[in-house]
Amino acid sequence: MRTDKSRKRFVFLCVAPATILFFLFMILPTLNVFRMSLYERGAYSPNETFVGLKNFQHLLRDAQFIRSMQNMILLVVTVTLITFAFALVFAAILTREKIKGQNFFRIIFYIPNILSVVVISGIFSAIYKPENGMLNSIIGLFRNMSDPILWKGEKLVIPSIIIAMVWQAIGYYMVMYMASMSAVPISLYESANLDGAGRLTQFFQITIPLIWTNIRTTLTFFIISTINMAFLFVKAMTSGGPNGASDVALSYMYSQKDAGLYGYSMAIGVVIFLFSFALSACVNKVTNRDTLEF
Amino acid sequence: MQNTTEKSSRSAEGLYKFFIYFVLILLAVTIIVPVAWVFMASIKQNAEFYGNPWALPAGFYWQNFVNAWNGAKMGEYMLNSVIVTALALALLLVVALPAAYCLSRFHFKGCKVLNTLFMAGLFINVNYIVVPIFLMLRDGDVWLKSHFGSGFLLNNLVVLAVVYAATALPFTIYLLSGYFATLPHDFEEAAYIDGASYFSTMTRIIFPMAKPSIITIILFNFLSFWNEYIISMTLMSSTKAPRTLPVGLLNLMQAQQSAAQYGTMYAGLVLVMLPTLILYICVQRQLTQGMTVGGLKG
């Protein structure tokens, strides 16, 4: 019998386990990030003392924290711009042009996305190795290599990480935009062709406006995921070194946790949370356009 | 006059085509070559790493894989990874499927709030909250120790699997709800008229229809659980703790900087990426099509 009571019991039994797990391992820790940022906590005892905003005041005077925030912003901005530019252009080429082996390219470009960041960092340390590295041995063909280029040295470490991150992300976004671009009706391009519009005009006037909604959603999520991916790459490739030159905010937060400064580490967490929300809200606002339908 | 412009536009066309192929092939090469290089390096002897990096391996030096599998314990780590990934996937499916079904198709008190909360969960990155999760489990261990003599929350594969499953819930529920919401209500009404219970309607009628979505979430979550290393490293920090494959590989990579066991390290790299590559070759169509359903990743 489908009584109201049995319906209620069914819904409860279905929803409760997921809700409990979600609260225990996501909502509660998130609230704890904010709460613990106001406390100081002993490294080995769970005793906490309330210190108000002291942790945040320390943050403002912490040069390494400011450096890590700068690195994070630099990584997020450059990786996002480069990845999106490449992904959109490649997707447009692969969907619009008659390319032989289109499927082959799609399959190959997606490969980096399925590899663990640890594996990618291993691959890139073989590429960036100063002696006998793949990159330096190619450059060595053109110039004297008596002083090998230190790709993971203090000067070049951030560009090196950017290259690795772009390498990993392009394929995923390219495949996604290929799907939405192939939904754009061909008749639009045909009539544009008759009007004499070139490829570039078609790309900016037809393709981009029509998949704008998709670009917008993915952009917001890409920014959040890049903050996170930057941490994964830095942690595996350099652990923030040399001399903290490649620290990003999350890796700095993690190293403070390792040092036992939990309250301080969580204050950094709060800043990252607020930063990522503010940034996605800004992006959402800036990219807001009237939706076009086709 | 007309003839010449046509000719020049045709040669421009040819140049454009050439340029496109050049760029596409260049990008493909930057992806294939490093991955293939690692495969080649994994069968090189240690002495070969001091010469030209582009030299082909002198022979098949399988000892690297034996060293990685036994000496560096990659075999043991592989088993740990299989256990964690399988457990986490099973738990995730059992918990997320019914929840997504009810959240998208039933109206009940608080269903709006829950839907919003799960949506908000999409914006919470696991690595933002790994420290509080670690501290919560450690405090739990301290409490258990004082009451029962021993704690089991940290350094435990099962707990790691539970954390994986829990943190994958928002994405999985979002994806599944999106699919369930598109189904017409006639399916359930017909089943109810035939006297089916809520539970059997859900498991016998709705879930089989959602098979493509279920395969998609299994694929994506398999990759993210198999490749994950930050949570695993944090929650399994004790030296005797069971390690998962990526964490074991990270340790191996850090160790080889002093020991210079290049061959073993690259064999380890191959062992970590081979399962995902094989899976990808088998299901690449499903994977690249499935992702357009979700349109985002964590």
Image (spheres, coloured by chain):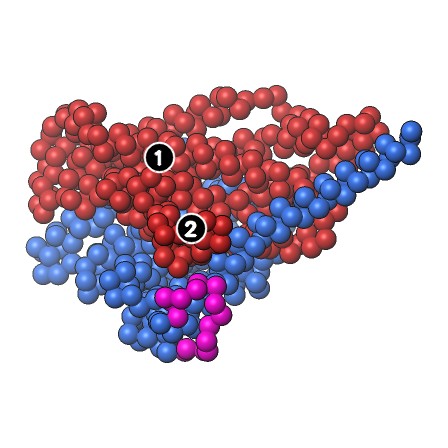
Chain colours: A red, B blue
Residue drawn at 59 percent across, 46 percent down = A175
Q: Is residue B209 found left or right of A187 in the rendered image?
A: left
Give yes or no for residue B214 being in the magenta stretch. Answer: no
Dot 1: chain letter: A
Looking at the rendering, which quadrant does residue A58 occupy?
top left
The residue segment tinted magenta is: B48-62
**Looking at the rendered structure, which numbered label has been put on residue A144?**
2
Dot placed on the residue nearer the N-terminal end, 1 or 2: 1
Residue A196 visible in the shown view: yes
Percent x, y of residue B266: 39, 66
For mark 1, give the secondary structure: helix
Looking at the rendering, which quadrant does residue A292 occupy?
top right
Q: How crowded is mark 2: few (under 14 residues within 10 Å), some or many (20 or more)?
A: few
- Relative to the observer, which residue lies in front, B4 or B298? B4
Residue drawn at 69 percent across, 30 percent down = A200
Q: Is residue A48 found left or right of B187 in the rendered image?
A: left
Q: Is residue B47 found left or right of B2 in the rendered image?
A: left
Percent x, y of residue A88: 60, 37
Given the image, on which type of amino acid does mark 1 rest? Met
Residue B295, relative to residue B158: is it above or below? above
**Residue behind mark 1:** A72
The residues bearing labels 1 and 2 have C-alpha atoms spaced at a distance of 34 Å
